[in-house]
Image: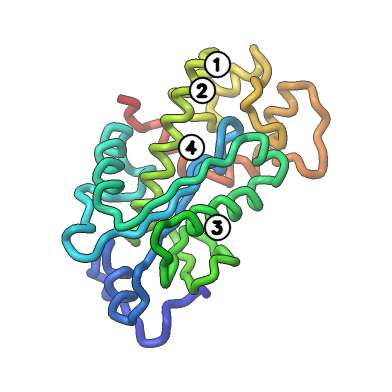
Amino acid sequence: MSTLPRGTTVRRDAGIYGYERALRRAGLAPVAGVDEAGRGACAGPLVAAAAILAEGRAGQVPGLADSKLLTARARERCYEQVVRRAAAWSVVVVGHEECDRLGMHVANVEALRRSIALLDERPAYVLTDGFPVDGLGVPGLAMWKGDRVAACISAASVIAKVTRDRLMVELHEEWPAYDFATHKGYVTPEHTAALAVHGPCPVHRRRFVNVRRAAGLPETPETISLEAQLQLDLDTRHREALEETT
């Protein structure tokens, strides 16, 4: 579904909680938001999360916004509030090997489906960020930049991003030469330089062309080009280069 249910309207000044309020008025509650982190990275896992926020003031999270627009410290604070105030939430981690086996689009869609299925409360409606996700078993709406305009998607974005960042910091301890703690596995000049010197480590995704080149592997029809890599998560790559790391 790409439009709101008939008769459902959201005022322009309704704020980040406006879509959920409108859907509840239409009898479509609870409303879940779903989002992912790490789709455009060439190393580490893909992480998807889903969240249903409590109704009313109890579900309003101070400082909630798209996780990519928050500093690392603000995201951590927001994460604690989200998991405390959510009526239900879930997180799914898809390892680099499964990402390579399935391909990034299939892995992403599967992770989003799993995160909805793992919620303790079955949603009546699902809001997704950017593109529709079939096979959820309930109606939904794909929203352009949904993590900026719908609170439940923003909440899911924060859960996914914080979870993945923590995992990348752990991988940094195991593979410090790549500085995963800073760039989180995305394609940056520093990451590219480390790949050129050290070659890929076991957690790099072999479908990505820069990783295959660093490993001396031939490109295949399934290889993701550098242009496609950058397109996967261009906004994330730019913002994280500017983001605070403490």
Task: Name the residue tied to disc 4.
Answer: 237
Please state the horizontal and vertical placement of residue 236, each as a whole percent of the image. Answer: 46, 41
Circle on res. 171: 2
Q: CA distance from mark 2 to mark 4?
A: 19 Å
Kindly report the distance in space between the C-alpha atoms of the residues bearing marks 4 and 1.
Answer: 21 Å
Q: Amino acid at mark 1?
A: Trp
The C terminus appears in which quarter of the rendering? Answer: top left
- Label 2 and label 3: CA atoms lie apart by 26 Å
* Label 1–label 2 contact, CB within 8 A: yes
Viewer-nearest of labels 4 and 1?
1
Residue at 52%, 75% in the rendered image: 1
- The answer to whether 86 appears left or right of 195 in the picture is left
Task: Tell me residue 195's x, y (percent).
Answer: 63, 19
Q: Secondary structure at mark 2?
A: helix
Q: Is residue 191 above or below residue 17?
A: above
Q: Where does label 3 land, which residue?
A: 113
Amino acid under disc 3: Arg
Label 1 to label 2: alpha-carbon separation: 6 Å
Instruction: Quickly name the residue at label 1.
Output: 175
